[in-house]
Image (tube, rainbow, N blue to C red):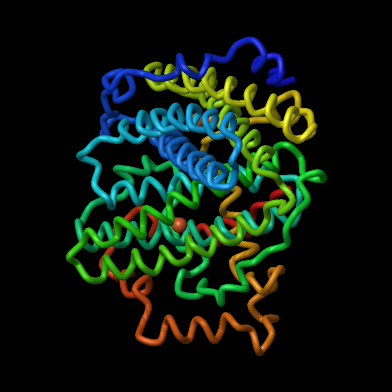
Amino acid sequence: MTINVLDEMRSRGVPVDKQYRSWSDFTIEPYNKREVDTFTRSRIYLMGAIESGVIDHSNTFLRFTGNEEIRNTLAMIRRAEHQQEVALNYLIPGDESPLERTIAWEQMMVELTAYCARSESDPYIKQVFNYILLDDFDHLYRFCELMDLVERRDPNEILQYRTEIHWGRATSEGHHFPTDDIKQGCSRRSMSPLTTFHILTLLNAKRRKRDFYVNQGNQYTHNLSRQVYSEIAEIEEQHLTMLTSLCDPTTTFFELELLNHACEAFNYYNFGQDETDPRIRRVWNDHYYMELEHMRIMGEFLQRFEGKAATDVISSHFPEAIRFTSNKDYISWVLGTQVGLRSVGHDFVSRENVPSDWLSNYYSGVVNAKGCPCEQVVHTDLNLPRHRFDLSERAGVLAWV
Ligand SMILES: [Fe+2]
Ligand SMILES: [Fe+2]
Ligand SMILES: [Fe+2]
């Protein structure tokens, strides 16, 4: 049995006005990029992204409420979130290049999405996650090719051999007409607490990743690099649309505010358990106690302003954790069995069965009309470890339930 979060938030949170810190307290020494464990880095990237998404929602909420008590309380919480986000993003060192960060981001997304897909109980949502997984797996491969082409470096300096480097669903074949990214909206009332946290976690990570590519891909003078970033950025936008379209459209601002803080607390708590670096573990624990108070306040507001109990929105106990770990066998299985799927409206169908008037055929023709940067970046003079290892062959002997 996991912890009772309702008890925790009633008794262990830090008052919001005690959450503000001095500049030097929340911008601490960055990690060493040559020594950091790759999954410690994944946790740092992910939580910075979640903080950013929570701040976005809080600001949107502010725009749509005239109640001064709510506006002031949101502002107080949002300032604490801002300091949390800065604390996390400033753990990333200045000597970590945009391409190193890109490869680390794709690894984080691959392992996060694979873990969420593995542990997802709703078959439709699991299918969406698996679909996104094979796209991100391919992005990782293309960026590794780019690193080899431009810098002649082995991407395993970053990946630490925890994630395979291998093509997934070819990026050039993944471009959709916008409506093919709209998936079936789900009812939160029939969703498990873990499914809700899967969607919120992936959604916020994906939002940040799209922003990163849109804003960082222009840092290169090398033209093919710029084009690879622009091509992959658009698939990140597709994924963001897919994940957002899964969300329950009846969720209110108060409900989402509570869910957001609960999702933060859930991940901080679990990362505090998993973290191997004691210095970073302290950050997870400090932020966890702050989130408990955000949850408590929003639970109270939910009761006062909408007449709903916190337990109408969140479960009394946290579900099982989202963890960072290698998922090589699971990814092999998904690759071996689902790489031929294509997104057609709400559904996924095999490549052979897409309708002749599939709008994404038209769209691919437009964007790929003058060549595909993600194909051009693949070159033949590589000697990376992946060439000794064929995941799709291995997939044939694996079974995954
Ligand atoms: Fe936060
Ligand atoms: Fe990606
Ligand atoms: Fe929060």
Q: Position of residue 241 (x, y in %)?
A: 57, 61
Whether residue 296 is visible: yes
Residue 214 quadrant: bottom left
Name, please, the residue furthest toward the right: 190
Q: Nearer the viewer, residue 347 or 118?
A: 347
Which residue corresponds to the image point at 23% horizontal and 52% vertical from the top-left? 153
Task: Identify the image quadrant of residue 176.
Answer: bottom right
Which residue sits furthest left?
221
Q: Residue lying farthest top?
A: 11
Image x and y of residue 274, in percent: 52, 24
Q: Describe residue 89's horizontal placement relative to residue 32 as left or right.
A: right
Please determine whether, in this image, residue 158 is positioned above or below residue 232: above
Compared with 270, 375 (above or below) is below
Percent coordinates x, y for residue 132 in the rendering: 57, 58
Query: Which is nearer the eye, 185 or 268?
Result: 185
Residue furthest bottom as drawn: 356
Residue at image location 66% in from the left, 45% down from the top:
118
The picture quadrant where one finds residue 189 is top right
**Could you tell me which residue is drawn at 36 percent across and 28 percent down?**
87
User: Which residue is found at the position 53% from the left and 14% from the top?
Assistant: 14
Q: Ligand 2 is found in which quarter of the picture?
A: bottom left
Residue 393 visible to the viewer: no
> Where's residue 396, x and y in %?
63, 59
Q: Quadrant of the N terminus?
A: top right
Decide which of 44, 151 is in the foreground and name it.
44
- Along the horizontal axis of the image, is 236 left or right of 145? right
